Image: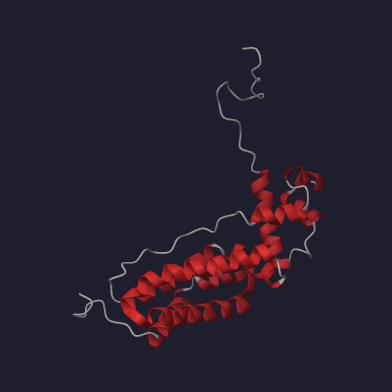
Amino acid sequence: MAGEREPPAGQAPGEAAPRDDTRARILAAAMEAFARDGFDATSVRSIARRCGISDAGVFYYFPTKRHLLEALWNEAPAGSFPVGDPAAPLTAERLAELVRATIHISAENFTYLRLVARQALASDETAIALRNASRARWRTALARHFQAAGPRAAELVETFAAAVTGYLLRLEMETGDAYPEAVRDDAFQERVIRAVQRLLPVERADSPAAG
């Protein structure tokens, strides 16, 4: 039919065109490099080399390195926090579930969170806003699980957040790029869980008050 484009060679009429994943590969390479080495210390050439393309190939999708960073801010972190019953008591088992969920999300989004933290330290306003919003979402999700604690709920949320964050930050400093694997270690997770359970007043799931 006049005006219709002919499909590329090897592609049948009506068949979807092969997906161009070059942009996604550029973003992935840039996120890893920016998070590890910093935005200023990373060149477009190094990103292009990691993708096996020319500098022009990067600039085809992103006019400047700053455009590339801004595109990364639109990458949504993976994972979601468990939804809790506000009326349920705070049990040792529930705390363990919250610790594991926090660890899972931090491992899945390690590179993104590392980039946000690095750029926030560099006074990047977007990164600061993203960091603050991420912390607020986490605390809001936690608060739902602590509502049964009544007036002490906010205090307990902050105690939980400070304890878990302290363990995770220390592990990141000790392990660096190996953090995602290290944080998934069962022994490490149990150590964090026990520490949090000692800090917070909890009930056993099979206790009369919990039942």
Which quadrant of the view contains residue 111? Answer: bottom right
Q: Number of callouts in the render? A: 0
**Relative height, residue 160 to residue 138 (above, below):** below
Percent of width and height locating residue 76: 55, 55
Which quadrant of the view contains residue 42? Answer: bottom right
Percent of width and height locating residue 65: 77, 54
Percent of width and height locating residue 184: 49, 70
Q: Nearer the viewer, residue 114 or 157?
A: 157
Percent of width and height locating residue 77: 54, 59
Q: Residue furthest front?
A: 151
Work out whether residue 50 can be spotted. no
| Residue at position x 66%, y 49% in the image | 25
Where's the C terminus, which quadrant?
Answer: bottom left
Q: Nearer the viewer, residue 142 or 32?
A: 142
Q: Nearer the viewer, residue 154 or 176?
A: 154
| Residue at position x 31%, y 76% in the image | 148
**Relative height, residue 198 to residue 60 (above, below):** below
Where's the N terminus, which quadrant?
Answer: top right
User: Quick check: 68 left or right of 199?
Assistant: right
Work out whether residue 122 can be spotted. yes
**Relative height, residue 167 to residue 69 (above, below):** below
Q: Residue furthest bottom?
A: 198
Model colouring: secondary structure
| Residue at position x 64%, y 39% in the image | 20
**Relative height, residue 136 to residue 12 (above, below):** below
User: Quick check: 158 left or right of 16?
Assistant: left
